[in-house]
Image: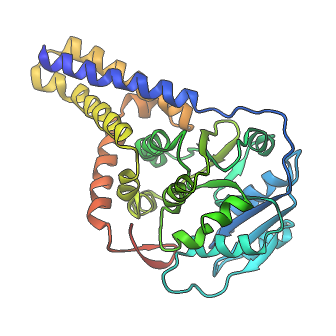
Amino acid sequence: MILLGLTLALAAIGFLLLCRLRSCRLVPQPRSPGNLSVIVPARNEEHNLPTLLGSLASQPIRPLEVLVVDDGSTDRTAELAGERGAVVLASAPLPAGWRGKTWACHQGALAARGDLLLFVDADAWFEPGGLHNVLSSYPGGAFSVGPFHAVRRAYEDLSLFFNLNMTVGTAPGGLFGQMLLVDRASYQRVGGHEAVRGRILENFWLASRFRASGIPVRSACGRGVFSFRMYPNGVREVVHGWTKGFASGAGQTPRGTLFLLVAWMTGLMLAAVGGIVTGDWLPWSAVYLLCAAQVGCFSRLLGAFRWTTALLYPVPLIFFFGVFAWSAMRSGKQVTWKGREIRAD
């Protein structure tokens, strides 16, 4: 009974996290959007760019310009971007000490003409009316929206607990890596992407620099507003994608939030094995279903995850623990990402 009580106490933490996640919503208010420059760093993104650029073209609010920085692509990235009305910037050779993304964003910011800079990953897109929603919710300073995960294949459900930890650990006081909206003066004040040029998870380090300079940092969840599809090319890409810096990202999560997440996930694992360990199946089955319902609520807020994934949540949870451990072991070592050898954060 002691173990069952402990498990219930840890599972209850999930309700606290769920309430916090539900509160991280966009709050639109009447305001002038200003001159907006959209900057898209892109390396071999011919399959993703048409969706993003198409979503921007269909918005009721049009940006001043859309700049696609072609980071040495070997596919039709530059051609497709030009065909869809974007201004294409050919990236200069990658200097020593820079990451490809930070170098591309830096060059885009230098070329941009707008008062507001919106950095967007090429594998994301805006839902109908989403750009207006983001701009009207912009509180000033550095602002980010966590994208809703468009899950299409079964293996993509393995990212569930990564998405959950990323979102709960970031909103409302951090920055998501997929999107950053910031006024030019604030961006230049902290040194822009040049100040974090060697970082894979540049969003965490930029958030720290903004806060240190007294610039407000806010974020919200993007369901119905901003979406993405992560790692659509198989389990191997899922593993490599999360390995390249997730353990380092967890280290940047506020310690109180990290403690709550670890405690809750421990409760989830106890609920999964309690019946096996004790042989008392009836109460443990009830606790397991409660935990599965919690995971299901989280999953619907974060992405189009299948209900069977919540019911069988130990599978993506064990996957999360395994890849997290691998990411921690690989920290500081060479990993391959988008054809480049990089040192994992």
State the residue at coordinates (48%, 61%): 201
Image quarter (top left, top right, bottom left or bottom right) of the C terminus: bottom left
Q: How many marks?
A: 0
Q: Is residue 95 above or below residue 125?
A: below
Colouring of the image: rainbow
| In the image: residue 76, left or right of residue 286 | right
User: Which of the 4 image quarters holds residue 277?
Assistant: top left
User: Which of the 4 image quarters holds residue 254?
Assistant: top left
Q: Position of residue 96 (x, y in %)?
A: 50, 86
State the residue at coordinates (15%, 26%): 276
Q: Position of residue 261 (x, y in %)?
A: 35, 36
| In the image: residue 34, left or right of residue 173 | right
Q: Is residue 10 visible?
A: yes
Q: Position of residue 180 (x, y in %)?
A: 65, 55
Q: Is residue 12 above or below residue 262?
A: above
**Nearest the camera: 257 or 21?**
257
| In the image: residue 187, left or right of residue 197 | right
User: Which of the 4 image quarters holds residue 118?
Assistant: bottom right
**Nearest the camera: 37 or 317?**
37
Q: Is residue 47 visible?
A: no
Image quarter (top left, top right, bottom left or bottom right) of the N terminus: top left
| Residue at the far left in the pictured view | 278
Q: Is residue 128 above or below residue 35?
A: above
Q: Is residue 261 above or below residue 187?
A: above
State the residue at coordinates (44%, 47%): 159
Q: Position of residue 150 (x, y in %)?
A: 60, 44
